Amino acid sequence: MSFTSPFTGQVIQPTDVSYRSVSISVNTTLSWPINGSAIDNAVARIMDVTATAAGLSLSMPPANQASVGSDALIRNVGANTVTIKDYDGNSIASVAPSAARYIYITTNATTAGTWGNIAFGVGSSNVDAGALAGYGLKAITNTLNAAHNVTTFSSSYTAIASDRASYYVWNDGAGTLTLTSAVTLGNDWFMMLRNSGTGTLTVSPSGGDLINGAASISLQPSDSCFICCSGLAFYTVGLGRSTQFNFTQLTKAVTSGSYTLTSAEAANVVQKYTGTLSGNVTVTLPQTVQVYYITNQTNGTGAGYQITFTTGAGGGTATVPAGEQVILLCDSVNLLNASTIAAGALNVSLVNGTVAAPSLNFASENSTGIYRPTSGELGMAILGVKLFGLSSAGLTISGTGTFTGGISGGVF
């Protein structure tokens, strides 16, 4: 049977069936209502469809057997979603319960053809929420609802346009979130950000853009904020910082080896270390900006064991012998002694120190320096060995001496 007009050479519109009510229990393929067709599954201009089971589909007839513009209005009057497909099995649209779709042929060169579709809404006048949901929105039944997808990340990332309304959570040490240029993201773009990691998270715009008037901002652990774009720059809203200024103390028992503080432990500005040391101890602090008041109350004096503090970032470290305390300033990489000068003081008092850890020593060699061996004596240690002692009884030097200028005076 031919579907081409002998007068125009164009495909002929099939005979029109105005309305059908169809109930399907299996995947069903429709046919065009052509005169003389004995198949009773014709497509109608208006169809009420009921699917008796979930996941069923209704396939349209071959597109190359009808004219461009051949159409059907399909309304789902059942309780299950129905998928409308072309003749080759490609999805055209999904029709939710109580929704309707108007579909029509736009090209008919193949059996599949190309079909346009228009959502006629849900019920009597509602729009299709699923077709309208964009970034930050989610269709729940027939309504649009706010939705902020949560994404955790542990390596540096660049936020892009599709991250609009998303919620990003950092969960590692120090890291960087780079923002795509403000011009590209445009006015009204925003995202939410939280630092749930153990180090500083740096937020850096690109292309010379500023955030809060600066080239970058830093989020310390537990900080959070909205990042909003004006199309020219970035701003934060509700940059959450702790409002508690009370000092809290961490008491941690150590023996030997390495310890890494959790974010909860490192939140204590005052830290006391106890226990009997059986070896040197290394404590890793978070890579964040902070001041620490540390006291080493371990029993490690006899063997000369000490506690060394580091951020693990390859910067400066600080070593605290047993029985001593220190104020450390962390710049997220280096640990620096905060007590390098006593402003306005007439004198400076030092702890006694030991031969293994002189009270006045060097950051790169803390076993060399000056200490107080006993009452009324000044001692000097070189690499943990006492080589010089000065008291009211005189000078005591261990080892031999080399005097390039000679020796004069006194009796030898």
Image (cartoon, rainbow, N blue to C red):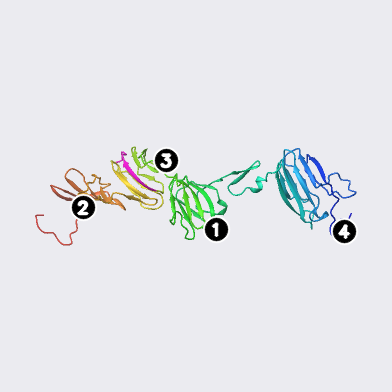
Nearest-to-viewer mark from 2 and 4: 4
On-image quarter of the C terminus: bottom left
Nearer-N-terminus badge (2/4): 4
On-image quarter of the N terminus: bottom right
Read off the residue under disc 1: 184
Nearer-N-terminus badge (2/1): 1
Q: Is residue 139 left or right of residue 326?
A: right
In this orientation, does residue 262 appear? no
Q: Is residue 381 left or right of residue 287?
A: left
Task: Quote the CA–CA distance across marks 4 and 3.
Answer: 81 Å
Looking at the image, residue 79 lies above or below residue 102: above
Read off the residue under disc 4: 5
Read off the residue under disc 3: 264
Stretch of the chain drawn in magenta: 289-300
x, y percent for residue 299: 31, 38
Nearer-N-terminus badge (4/3): 4
Task: Quote the CA–CA distance across marks 2 and 4.
Answer: 119 Å
Does the magenta-highlighted stretch encompass residue 342? no
Nearer-N-terminus badge (3/2): 3
Q: Which amino acid, mark 4? A: Ser
Count residues near mark 1 (Cα–Cα under 10 Å), then give few for <14, some for 14-19, many for 20+: few
Q: Which amino acid, mark 3? A: Ala
Q: Which amino acid, mark 2? A: Gly
Q: Residue furthest front?
A: 125
- Label 3 residue SS: helix
Task: Quote the CA–CA distance across marks 3 and 1.
Answer: 39 Å
- Label 2 residue SS: loop
Nearest-to-viewer mark from 2 and 1: 1
Q: Is residue 140 left or right of residue 313?
A: right
Residue 399, disc = 2
